[in-house]
Image: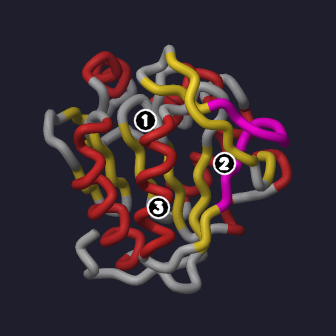
C-alpha cells in the first residue's frame, strides 16, 4: 500500500458471487480495510459464496453481508468488482447487480475492476468513451461496448481503476486506495 490515502469513515462495497477469484476478492479487501475502510460483501443471495483459484479449484467460502436487492450505491463510497470468469458472468445476468454497478458509475463514485470484473461494467453500458484494461479475453467485449482498451497493469480513468489479472494486484490495490481516498464520498 502506498500510504498516500486514508479511507477512514468510508464504506466500500465488494460485489461478488460464487466463482469469484479468491485472491481478487481478498487482496483488494485487505488493502482498503488496512487504509481504514469498512467493507461489505454484496452478492446475489444471502449466505456464503464459494471463491475459486484459477476458476477451477475451490478455495474459501465468504459470508455475504447484504444482497444486491437490499442495498443501493447510495449506501457506499466506492465499489470493487473482482474477477474470476463465472463470478462476473453471473453478475451481468442479474438486473439488480447491473443497476447497482451502473448507479456507482453514473454517480461518479470510484470503482475498481480487475480481470473479468469489467464484464459487469460492459453490461451496465458504462465503458463507452472510457479507457481501461482487463483480462485479454474480455478486450473485444470492452471495445464493442465503446471502451478503449490498453494493456497495462493498472489503468486509471477518472474514478475508474482497472487491472488485468492477479499478477497486477499490488498495483491495483495501491491504485484503488489512492483513487478511493481522493474521490468525493457519497453522492
Alpha carbons under labels 3 and 1: distance apart: 21 Å
* Badge nearest the viewer, 2 or 3: 3
Tell me the residue at 50%/79% (across/down). Answer: 36
Horizontal arrangement in the rendering, residue 66 relative to residue 159 (left or right)? right
Q: Secondary structure at mark 2?
A: helix
Image x and y of residue 19, in percent: 59, 25
Residue 187, can we see it?
Answer: no
Q: Secondary structure at mark 3?
A: helix
| Pointer 1 residue | 118
- Label whose residue precedes the other's in the sequence (2 or 3): 3
For the residue carrying disc 3, how many other residues have a C-alpha within 10 Å: few (<14), some (14-19), or many (20+)? some
Quadrant containing the N terminus in the rendered view:
bottom left
Image mark for residue 100: 2
* Badge nearest the viewer, 3 or 1: 3
Residue 64, can we see it?
Answer: yes
| Pointer 3 residue | 30
Q: Quadrant of residue 4?
A: bottom left
Q: Main secondary structure of the magenta part?
A: strand
Tell me the residue at 66%/34% (across/down). Answer: 17
Q: Secondary structure at mark 1?
A: helix
Q: Does 60 appear in magenta?
A: no
Q: Quadrant of residue 179?
A: bottom left
Give above or below for 37 relative to 124.
below
Give above or below for 29 relative to 130.
below
Q: Which residues are magenta?
A: 40-50
- Label whose residue precedes the other's in the sequence (3 or 1): 3
- Label whose residue precedes the other's in the sequence (1 or 2): 2
Image mark for residue 177: none
Amino acid at each position: 500500500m502506498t500510504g498516500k490515502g486514508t479511507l477512514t469513515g468510508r464504506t466500500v462495497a465488494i460485489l461478488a458471487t460464487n466463482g469469484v477469484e479468491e485472491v481478487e476478492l481478498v487482496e483488494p479487501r485487505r488493502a482498503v480495510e488496512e487504509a481504514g475502510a469498512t467493507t461489505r460483501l454484496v452478492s446475489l443471495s444471502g449466505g456464503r459464496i464459494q471463491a475459486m483459484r484459477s476458476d477451477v479449484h475451490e478455495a474459501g467460502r465468504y459470508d455475504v453481508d447484504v444482497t444486491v436487492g437490499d442495498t443501493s450505491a447510495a449506501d457506499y463510497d466506492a465499489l470493487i468488482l473482482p474477477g474470476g470468469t463465472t463470478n462476473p458472468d453471473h453478475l451481468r445476468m442479474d438486473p439488480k447487480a447491473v443497476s447497482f454497478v451502473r448507479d456507482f458509475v453514473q454517480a461518479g463514485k470510484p470503482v475498481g475492476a480487475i480481470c473479468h470484473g469489467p464484464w459487469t461494467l460492459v453490461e451496465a453500458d458504462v465503458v463507452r468513451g472510457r479507457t481501461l484494461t482487463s483480462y485479454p479475453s474480455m478486450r473485444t467485449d470492452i471495445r464493442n461496448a465503446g471502451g478503449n482498451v490498453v494493456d497495462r497493469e493498472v489503468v486509471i480513468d477518472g474514478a475508474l481503476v482497472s487491472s488485468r489479472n492477479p499478477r497486477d494486484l499490488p498495483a491495483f490495490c495501491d491504485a484503488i486506495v489512492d483513487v478511493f481516498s481522493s474521490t468525493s464520498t457519497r453522492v
